[in-house]
Image (spheres, rainbow, N blue to C red):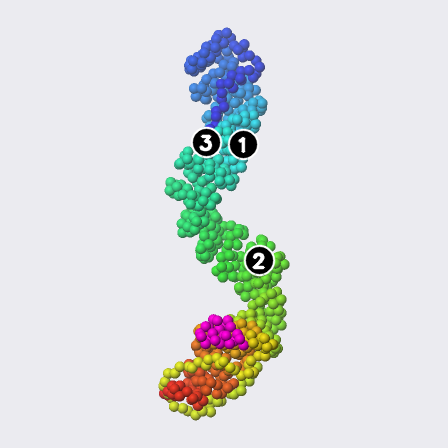
Amino acid sequence: MNIKKSILTGILVSSIGIGGVPAMAQMSPEASALYQEACSAEHQQDMKGAISLLEKASALAGNDTMIYTKLAGLYTEIGENDKALELYKKVINLKPDDAFIYISIGSIYETQAKYKEALQAYEKALDLFPEYKYNYYNIANTQYQLKDYNSAIKNYNAFLETYSQHTESRENLAASYFAVKDYKNAVEQYKKLYEKNQDNYKHYAEYGLALLNTNEFEKSAEMLEKAIERNPDNNSAHLGLAQAYQELGKNELSYEQYQFVLEKVPNLNTVRLDYANLLANMNKNTEALTQYNMYIQAYPNDVSGYKNIANVYKTLGNYDKALENYLIAIQKTPDDIDIKKDIAFCFHNKKDYTNSVKYYDEILAVQPDDYNIKFNKALALHALHKYEDAITLYKELQTVKSDKAVKENLNNALVARGHELLEIEDYETAMANFKQAIKDGYMDGYVYYGLAKVYRAQENNTKAAENYEKAISLDPDKTLYSAEYSDFISSLYKPKTNVQEAVSQEGPLPVINIEVETPEKTVSQTKPEETKPQLASPVAIKQNEDLISEGDKNLKNNNYDAAIKNYQDALQLVPSDAETLCKIGYIYKLKEDNMRAINYYQKSIIVNPDYTDSWFNLGLVYINENNFVEAQKSFERVISLDTDYNSGYAYYALGRALEAQGKKEDAIKNYKLFVKHSNDKETIENVQAQIKQLQK
């Protein structure tokens, strides 16, 4: 800041008349003559001669204030400020009410950088002569030098009320506002200076930085670019421009400015945090982490460094490193709720739900109505299988607003809790949970599966069957539902024949060591009449038959997807058609989609528990899945329904399932039964060879 000195010849001359008494009249003629000669010498720039003449005049005139004042001024002119001060003090002793003498004294002290003494002198002058407005400028300048910026601002403004065009005072006022971070008023003053003299404007950097701090980023960038044009080495302007570009999303330009400064001043750690933030925004995460670490080394107690480096790790999904830094940050600022939210988020995503709940509780102790935190806590409790607590929170959230996600999670928790209650045989409460979820719109088969298990436990078979079917219809690909429903249906029917008894009637047979392939039983095109459901009308019958006929043609021609579509359309007319369900299962078996094949075979069995084709083919799919226990059960079911099924092939298939489980004796018995019932000579020979091999 350019502080203009306030001692002026005009001020000194004007002080002659302040007292109202003509000083010349008090001098002797000799002293007056010497005074006049001194003035002539001063005019001719002979300062030393003038001083010599005034000293002689002073000896003749005694305590003449006019001579002392003139002589003090001349000493000031030649830089002998101490002698000047001594003379001004003599004048003050003789004339204590002369405001301009105090101003002159203040000016000398200001020149000597004795700002406190200068301020005292200027303030004394103000007390004596408040009408002299220029003195506000003197006072403001000394206050600025003493860094009493607020007082300086007050006096610069007082001065500018009278001298509004005074450039230096406005420059100093703008600088004072900037110093106290009153950027809005600083911008106002720099703007006035700019509009007054754009061609010779000197404060582009300061104006640009003030604009930056008032979030006027476009204008700030404009001014800082001009500042750099005039002074390419202005690091402050480069850094300010980097930040302005950063705020404007001009990341590449911002990056260039930071690079420029840090290459020149590599140890400038104060800017590394902003620079690292820029790098993180540009997805230069490795570079960002390097800069954050350098910043933390320089400022180990600044929480911002740890928070921001944690944010990068969180973005990268490295929750362990993110937590490491967030936990350091929270130690330094234990009450920072935002950091606690980040910590809870990281624990939650690490599936460390226990710790996430801990931090959710700390947050809710301060912000009990934070909806999102409460929801996240409910999710964490849900994941911890603390269903009752989760349900309570979900219900509480529902009282705040209607939220689809909350509703869905509440229903999920109710159903999960219902199944949990099933395990401890609390059937009534389980049923209440299931029904509440259904009432609220839960449409997953899992809830009906739960209800089916409740009704089954209560021996309400009609309701159990109804809910099993509902579960299967909602989730047709869930083989668990179909399998359990099949087991449930099977439990309601008694086998016609005890398979093991039929096997044990045979005596020992010779071992045959021959490998044989399991013959597949294809889906028959006809079946017992009782498995065909009664249709509602002749039209429906005709549509159903046409679709099945078309499906059969596509199956024969290996157009599997088209056949499935035909059969499924037929099922829309007659959903409980065991044969058509079996055909779809068969196609999926051919497509080697075993899970879907199992699903449709089980549905077929649910419709008709005595349908041997579906039982047999289900067993074959289980063999393909190496599930020999279930395969054994399926073939035993076939034999219980029809001891001569498919010319004895059920015995052969059962033998294969038993042999795979290491049950050689039982396998041999069933192979022998196959030989007894079969007319397939080639296969009989292979099986006999297999029997011999097993008996070795």
Residue 361 lies, in percent from the top left, at 56, 57
Query: What residue sits 52% from the left and 54% below the top?
Result: 341
What amino acid is labelled 1 in the image?
Ile
Residue 627 showing in the rendered view: no
Q: Which residues are magenta?
A: 545-566
Q: Position of residue 224 (x, y in %)?
A: 45, 37
Whole-number angstrom distance, CA of label 2 to CA of label 3: 56 Å
Element type at mark 2: helix
Q: Residues within 10 Å of mark 3 (few under 14, many from 20)?
A: some
Residue pictured at 53% horizontal, 22% vertical: 102
Q: Which residue is mark 1?
A: 153
Q: Earlier in the sequence, mark 3 or mark 1?
A: 1
Of the numbered discs in the image, which one, if any, rests on residue 374?
A: 2
Q: Is residue 587 above or below residue 160?
A: below
Label 3, label 1: how far apart the Cα atoms are: 21 Å
Image height check: is 393 above or below 55?
A: below
User: Circle 3 — which element?
Assistant: loop
Question: Marks 2 and 1, Cα distance to the nearest angstrom?
Answer: 50 Å
Vertically, is 637 above or below 102?
below
| Residue with the mark numbered 3 | 202
Name the side, left or right, on which 596 lies relative to 286: right
Q: Residue at x 46, y 81 (%)?
A: 521
